[in-house]
Image: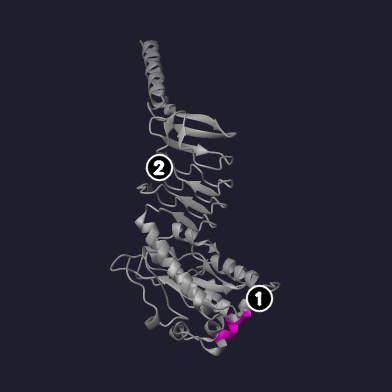
């Protein structure tokens, strides 16, 4: 009787393993690999979805094996360095999350006229050279691009020397005295030691500031306000703060970057997205005049000099404003 029970248990265990390991019907079985122009492409004919590609495909096929492409799946063209001009087939109704993430040479995306394709989060994230989108089907993305473009146009109209010579009210709020500025200047010179160009200096400052972690404790508990003072962050001694390392939020990162850039004579302004109602969507970053042009520096998201569309696709910025170097009365942004 004991042997019979053992055998019965063994049979039941075998059956349970088989049930658990059996492939789901209509999922992986539907995805097949097709060789197109020397590159292997994963395609699900049942849904018309491209599931993956390698780095050899430099265009988006309109159909595969006689079936129209309807969906560009998650991360399908991620980090494809050969894709420069993406023409989205008219049959495509959906571009999923991260589909073209970090396509570093992608400059232009063209949708079919009248396209209503839905664009997922980070679909064109970190496409730093992307600056042209034709027939953009996403009103939200288009509004964000238009809003940022207004800021870049305004930046181009500013006199960098005037910005450099303007002491803004930011510093009055932070109450930085001459001794504090002396400490900040010494740190800026230390960070940029050996840098010969403004770009090298700006990048060195950006990298140093970006190493300061985001204050997630404040993010989870709004009653504990983050440290935002540039002087305090530079002189932070964890032994005086219960062993805690310095941390801040986007405002603190932006103030600190602005102060350090100012000390190495690089014109910079504070750019921010205004919080709308009770929605917690405010965000701040910098624009700096480096080697003859204005560039974005976002030390919170660790961006340096991204392209306009690349920056926009990574950030939920619908309304952009600037708070120094610009007279509010001369510059107003309407809600999109």
In the rendered image, which quarter contains the C terminus? bottom left
Can residue 18 be seen in this snapshot? yes
Q: Residue at x 39, y 40 (%)?
A: 91
Hey, which quadrant is residue 94 in on the image? top left
Q: Residue at x 40, y 60 (%)?
A: 316
**Residue 174 falls left or right of residue 182:** left
| Residue carrying label 2 | 90
10 Å crowding of disc 2: few (<14), some (14-19), many (20+): some
Of circles 2 and 1, which is in front? 2
Q: Secondary structure at mark 1?
A: helix
Mark 2 or mark 1, earlier in chain: 2
- 30 is higher (above) or lower (below) than 220: above
**Residue 159 falls left or right of residue 144:** right
Determine the main secondary structure of the stretch shown in magenta: helix
| Residue carrying label 1 | 190
In the rendered image, which quarter contains the N terminus? top left
**Residue 105 falls left or right of residue 144:** right
Hey, which quadrant is residue 237 in on the image? bottom right
Q: Residue at x 33, y 71 (%)?
A: 334
- Report x, y in % for residue 280: 34, 65
Residue 184 lies in magenta, yes or no? yes
- Residue at far front of view: 113
- Residue at far bottom of view: 178
Q: Which residues are magenta?
A: 180-186
Q: Secondary structure at mark 2?
A: loop
Hey, which quadrant is residue 144 in on the image? bottom left
Q: Residue at x 52, y 67 (%)?
A: 296
């Amino acid at each position: 009787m004991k042997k019979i029970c053992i055998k019965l248990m063994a049979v039941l265990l075998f059956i349970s393993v088989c049930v658990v390991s059996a492939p789901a019907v209509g999922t992986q079985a539907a995805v097949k690999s097709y060789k197109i122009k020397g590159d292997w492409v994963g395609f699900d004919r049942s849904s018309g979805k491209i599931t993956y590609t390698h780095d050899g495909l430099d265009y988006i096929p309109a159909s595969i094996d006689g079936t129209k492409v309807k969906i560009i799946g998650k991360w399908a063209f991620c980090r494809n360095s050969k894709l420069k001009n993406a023409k989205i087939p008219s049959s495509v109704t959906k571009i999923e999350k991260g589909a073209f993430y970090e396509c570093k040479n992608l400059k232009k995306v063209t949708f079919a006229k009248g396209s209503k394709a839905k664009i997922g989060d980070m679909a064109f994230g970190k496409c730093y050279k992307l600056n042209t989108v034709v027939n953009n089907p996403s009103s939200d993305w288009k509004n964000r691009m238009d809003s940022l473009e207004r800021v870049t146009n305004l930046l181009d109209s500013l006199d960098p020397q005037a910005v450099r010579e303007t002491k803004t009210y930011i510093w009055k709020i932070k109450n930085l005295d001459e001794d504090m500025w002396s400490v900040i200047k010494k740190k800026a010179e230390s960070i940029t030691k050996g840098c010969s160009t403004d770009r090298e200096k700006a990048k060195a400052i950006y990298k140093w500031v970006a190493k300061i972690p985001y204050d997630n404790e404040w993010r989870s508990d709004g009653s504990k306000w983050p440290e935002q003072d540039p002087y305090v962050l530079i002189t932070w001694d964890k032994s005086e703060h219960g062993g805690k390392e310095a941390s801040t939020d986007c405002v603190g990162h932006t103030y600190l970057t602005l102060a350090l850039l100012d000390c190495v004579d690089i014109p910079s302004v504070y750019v921010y997205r205004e919080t709308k109602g009770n929605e917690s969507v405010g965000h701040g970053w910098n624009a700096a005049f480096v080697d003859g042009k204005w560039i974005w520096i976002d030390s919170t998201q660790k961006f340096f000099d991204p392209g306009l569309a690349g920056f926009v696709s990574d950030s939920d910025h619908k309304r952009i404003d600037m708070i120094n170097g610009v007279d509010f009365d001369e510059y107003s942004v309407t809600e999109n």
